[in-house]
Amino acid sequence: MNQVPEKLISFRVYEDGTDLLGVADVQLPSIEPMTDTVKGAGIAGEVDSPVLGHFGSMTLTLNWRTVTRPLISLAQQKSHSLDLRGAIQVYNAGTGEYVTQPLKVVVKAIPKKTDLGKLDIGSGGDASSEFEVVYIKITLSGEVMVEIDKYNYICNIQGVDYLSSVRAALGLV
């Protein structure tokens, strides 16, 4: 069964799971492990070794057409719970049919920057909200693919909790 994920059909952004926000587009965060260079006896060169379950800054950006109430509201200096829900178009090459695959990205995010954009007659204002993501959970077709919670030492990627032994070692279990 050859499934070809083709494109995002549409998406919506909610705050606290219920309040619909109007956004032009979203730049999701990059998941980049923290690394440290390991070198020395027994290693032929250098290795940038990831720190188990730890990630660098994860930034999420909401781009707005113009200044809006949600843009200003999301500038409040507190954690915001954002729920991004999408519908992915998938082509089944075996049957020749299109199916819709649900995507859900939940983040807890703290505002880093609110760009009010520009004022230019007859055009969009290019306003944006930039956030530091401290929690992210990605669910694809009902299956949790990624859950990273920096403050609670959780790093679950495709069912493997990479920080369970660290929590145990720290007495957090």
Image: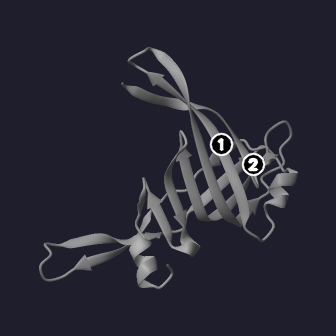
What residue is shown at x 31% (from left), y 71% (from top)?
Answer: 49
Q: Which residue is mark 2?
A: 14
Q: Are marks 2 and 1 in contact (CB under 8 Å)?
A: yes
Vertical relation: 21 (above or below) 53 = above
- Is 49 on the left or on the right of 112, as rendered? left
Amino acid type, callout 1: Arg
Residue at the image position 41 percent from the left and 78 percent from the top? 166
SS state under label 2: strand
Image quarter in which the N terminus is found = top left
Front residue of 142/59: it is 142
Q: Could you tell me residue 105's position as x and y percent?
A: 60, 50
Q: Position of residue 129 (x, y in %)?
A: 72, 57
**Which residue occupies the extreme top position in the image?**
96
Which numbered disc flags the more N-terminal residue, 2 or 1? 2
Front-lying residue, 165 or 84? 165
> Which residue is labeled 1 in the image?
85
Q: Label 2 is placed on what type of residue? A: Tyr
SS at mark 1 in the image: strand
Q: CA distance from mark 2 to mark 1?
A: 8 Å
Question: What is the x, y in percent for residue 87?
Answer: 61, 34
Residue 94: name its quadrant. Answer: top left
Q: Using a 10 Å C-alpha cutoff, classify the residue at mark 2 as few (fewer than 14 neighbours), some (14 to 19) or many (20 or more).
A: some
